[in-house]
Image: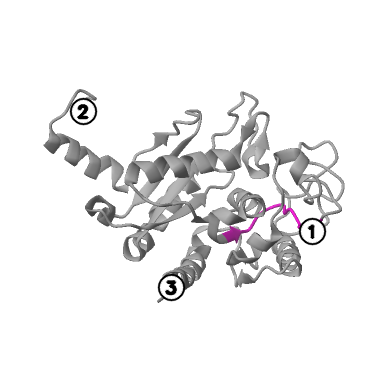
């Protein structure tokens, strides 16, 4: 396979192989240090307009493939494309694993990077993805709820899976524990009225009880006062986050999945069911 000028037939074949269905990994034009892959329903190649789900990986990063492939059947039969960003470990040369979870790392704004990826693929496929859904699990759950806080007008749904640490809608505490200085830190004004309009699901296994990776300690990169106040375990912290959102007037569907530990695959059916319901309402069915 070369990148030499191709015939129309060869171009069509390459598009069918690499740009539709489960795609190859692309570098983001806005910042080639970061990549993404997609599942694009084959009907897009025939001009069908579809919705978009952005699915954000956890710390291990390999879950982006689980999400691309795990949502592919859902996407094909529900007219939804799946965009999976890839945020490498140590992109600044320091070996850091968690910068994307807190939205900013040095001069990198991960929320804006995702918006650039969405813009790029919308133009490529001729789609209107001015709003989209977002799902993330573990580290992706960190990202998803913070993205919802920062950019609620961009979302038609948010599915927040088992984040290790949570940002509460607390105007008396600084980021990342609260949102008091969100304007100073990100140049964003929190829009509570817009967040109220976003259908929100929070999902975690009721056996997701290990704490070794989520307990903040003094001297840690993301240590600050109040870092552990939301609870000891992931279910505890997600319940606290749900209560914080609900206090602000957001409707939250909290799913505690019986017998499930920190297992992303075992929550996907719950997420698909939630998104299918939101899509039915969105499309007036």
109, above or below 257, in the image: above
Is any part of residue 61 visible from this angle? no
Identify the residue at horizontal 49%, vertical 43% (top origin): 85
Q: Element under label 1?
A: loop
Identify the residue at horizontal 81%, vertical 56% (top origin): 170
- How many angstroms separate mark 1 from mark 3 (CA)? 34 Å
- How many angstroms separate mark 1 from mark 2 (CA)? 53 Å
Determine which residue is flagged by label 1: 230
User: x%, y% of residue 40?
Assistant: 33, 51
User: x%, y% of residue 22?
Assistant: 33, 48
Identify the residue at horizontal 76%, vertical 36% (top origin): 221
The mark that comes first in sequence, 2 or 3, is 2
Which region shows up in magenta? 159-170
For the residues carrying marks 1 and 3, which lies nearer the camera in this image? 3
What label sits on residue 175 in the rendered view?
none
The mark that comes first in sequence, 1 or 2, is 2
What label sits on residue 280 in the rendered view?
3
Q: Element under label 3?
A: helix
- How many angstroms separate mark 2 from mark 3 (CA)? 42 Å
Q: Left or right: where does residue 26 sit relative to residue 236?
A: left
């Amino acid at each position: 396979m070369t990148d030499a000028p191709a015939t129309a037939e060869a171009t069509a074949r390459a598009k069918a192989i690499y740009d539709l269905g489960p795609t190859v990994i692309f570098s983001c034009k806005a910042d080639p240090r970061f990549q993404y892959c997609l599942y694009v329903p084959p009907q897009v190649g025939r001009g069908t307009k579809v919705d978009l789900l952005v699915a954000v990986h956890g710390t291990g990063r390999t879950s982006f493939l689980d999400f691309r492939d795990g949502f592919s059947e859902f996407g094909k039969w529900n007219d939804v494309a799946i965009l999976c960003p890839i945020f490498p470990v140590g992109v600044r040369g320091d070996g850091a694993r968690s910068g994307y979870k807190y939205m900013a790392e040095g001069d990198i704004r991960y929320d804006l990077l995702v918006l650039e990826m969405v813009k790029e693929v919308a133009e490529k496929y001729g789609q209107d993805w001015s709003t989209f859904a977002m799902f993330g699990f573990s580290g992706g759950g960190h990202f998803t709820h913070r993205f919802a806080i920062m950019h609620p007008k961009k979302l038609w749904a948010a599915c927040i899976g088992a984040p290790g640490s949570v940002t509460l809608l607390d105007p008396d505490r600084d980021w990342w524990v609260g949102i008091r200085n969100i304007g100073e830190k990100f140049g964003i004004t929190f829009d509570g009225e817009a967040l109220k309009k976003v259908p929100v699901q929070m999902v975690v296994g009721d056996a997701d009880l290990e704490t070794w990776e989520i307990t903040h300690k003094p001297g840690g990169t993301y240590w600050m006062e109040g870092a552990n106040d939301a609870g000891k375990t992931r279910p505890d912290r997600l319940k606290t986050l749900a209560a914080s959102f609900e206090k602000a007037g957001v409707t939250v569907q909290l799913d505690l999945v019986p017998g499930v530990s920190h297992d992303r695959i075992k929550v996907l059916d719950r997420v698909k069911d939630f998104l299918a319901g939101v899509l039915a309402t969105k499309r007036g069915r």
